[in-house]
Image (tube, rainbow, N blue to C red):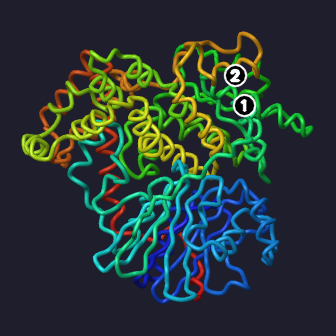
Amino acid sequence: MSRIFGSFGAPNTAVELNAVAGRQLHGGRDGTSVLRGDTWSLGCNRLAVLDPCGGAQPYRCPRLPGIAVVFDGEIYNHHQLRRRLRARGHVFTDTCDGSVLPALYAEYGTRFAEHLEGMFTIAVIDLRRRPLLVLAADDHGMKTLYYHTGPDGSVRFASELPGLLAFGQVPATERAAALDEYLSVGTYVDDRTALEGIRTLPPGTTALATGRDGLRVQRRTAPLPASDGPADLGDLLYGEMARLTSADVPLCGVVTEGADSHLVNAIATRQLRELDDSPLRGFHVVYRGRWHSSVCAAARRSGTLHHDVLLDPDELVELLPRTVWHLGQPHADPAAPGRYALFRAIRGAGYTVALTAAGAGELFDGHERVQRALTTPPELPWIGPYLDSLASVPRTVRASLYSADYRDYLRFRGTAADRLAETLHAGRADRAAALSAVETGWRLPAHQLRQIDHVSTAWSVEARFPYLQPAVSAFAGSLRARPATGDTPLFTTAQRYLPAGTLRRSARSTDVTADELLRPGSALMDLAQDILRETHLDERWDRTAVSNLISAQSRHPAPDTAAALWAVLVHELWRQELRVLRPATVHLSLPEPVAA
């Protein structure tokens, strides 16, 4: 795994490239390298997971001059690809997964990513004829790549937004509509970010640039699942996880309350024992003073060696600004700082790879908001309540926080919730498909996967996602065409793999909420008061309304008030970080980039 960056269509200085690498160094501490030509560059910060002694990036082959590749993620079918490519005459000097990429590109050109299984963002420079930049992202958006296209058609990209902003030509201009998107639907719509002109490479796409017309993004054709594979979720997971538990570094599991998490960890423990290895160690974050969770007992009954990561809420005064910086843009999930602390503990215990159950809820319609929307009778409204469940700030509070000018702007432009409601209304004939498009098409990558990618990489930990493997996600898609009966296939499968009594059908979420953290008199409430009473608040806020929000939470704390206050606090912490990201500074000393 690596954090990658680069440019195409314009020169960049060694100082700029070193600054970009410095801002992403936490994600790859095992080596930094940069390759540069007159009008292009490729670089990476490597975290060695497979073949630590090999796999030097950028990847190049002596037999393939003119092709250079950098890569972030893991390729799980690299053994099969290597055998296929060797049969075509290609030679490999190591067993690193990314080493197959130059040969794969040489064989299949810009369609090379159609042959990959895994999580990845990839950048290819092809200088053999007309210079060409090729970018590719995995089908679910498990890895993130930010990019900016300049007025001259030049392209700059990086795995993290602070890294991208280290390029002097990339502006840090806030996008006007982004604030309403953030508060209304919990994230940014489509491939947009909080900043003007900066986008993320959408899941399942390949993008091309020649240096004149910017980046042309093309959606790949989804591969058809094999028809002769197992039709049982447990068998599918067991087969897919045999590849995901392969690593040359220590591996552990992230533990949560749900059946999806316990199932993944139970299968991994069984597989490790079959290899005469020690059981999987699982990590779960617990806030001091919260209600007791059954996670520990359930994890131990499933065979996992369990570790509680105890976190004091007052520690969030220090952790929250760091989390906001690593996320790169506002993210109103109160659980994010806890996940940041969780991966800190995982790395501190000596682990580099962590299995997580992220994505299971979206693929198997396990979220309560989706179930409510699916089961609402046709004569009753379902779109409004569903959108309310996505919001960072409740609809009744949201508009009151906006300044008069911003409310006028939204009346002219339309709100994010209104536009999404129109999309759902257009797809109302197939409610399940419309909800799946929202849940898996943009909310999963933008809201959940991007958060996990950034907070895990902040501590040089690679998070892996068993439920997002192609065969498993294809199986989940086939279920949406069938009527729901009784327990979900996921819960039924988990019952087969876990001891009786391990699971509860209606497990309470262990994610912390804003009203638990922003208690009157708490250190975090003091931070909110200090930050939000400063004179340089975003002009899109109504200052009186923000002040009243603080007073209301201090005197009469309530969940809706706390959620709104948390969202405003995170946004303003991010704006503070944004101010110090300019101008870019060099954070480490690197050797002069190697000339092509």
| Residue 59 on image: x %, y % | 67, 74
Closer to the chain start, of discs 1 and 2, is: 1
State which quadrant residue 569 falls in. Answer: top left
In the depicted view, which residue is nearer to us: 86 or 570? 86
In the depicted view, which residue is nearer to us: 189 or 112? 112
| Residue 503 on image: x %, y % | 66, 15
Q: Which mark is residue 265?
A: 1
Horizontal side of 34 relative to 587 (left or right) equals right
| Residue 303 on image: x %, y % | 80, 24
Q: Secondary structure at mark 1?
A: helix
Q: Residues within 10 Å of mark 1 (few under 14, many from 20)?
A: many
Question: Which quadrant does the C terminus fall into?
Answer: bottom right
Q: Say above or below: 216 vs 335.
A: below
Report which residue position mark 2 lands on. 494
Q: Residues within 10 Å of mark 2 (few under 14, many from 20)?
A: many
Instruction: Give, as a three-letter code, the residue at label 1.
Output: Asn
> Mark 1 or mark 2: which is in front?
2
Q: Residue at x 66, y 56 (%)?
A: 74
Horizontal side of 551 relative to 101 (left or right) equals left
Q: Say above or below: 398 vs 327.
A: above
Q: Say above or below: 64 vs 327.
A: below
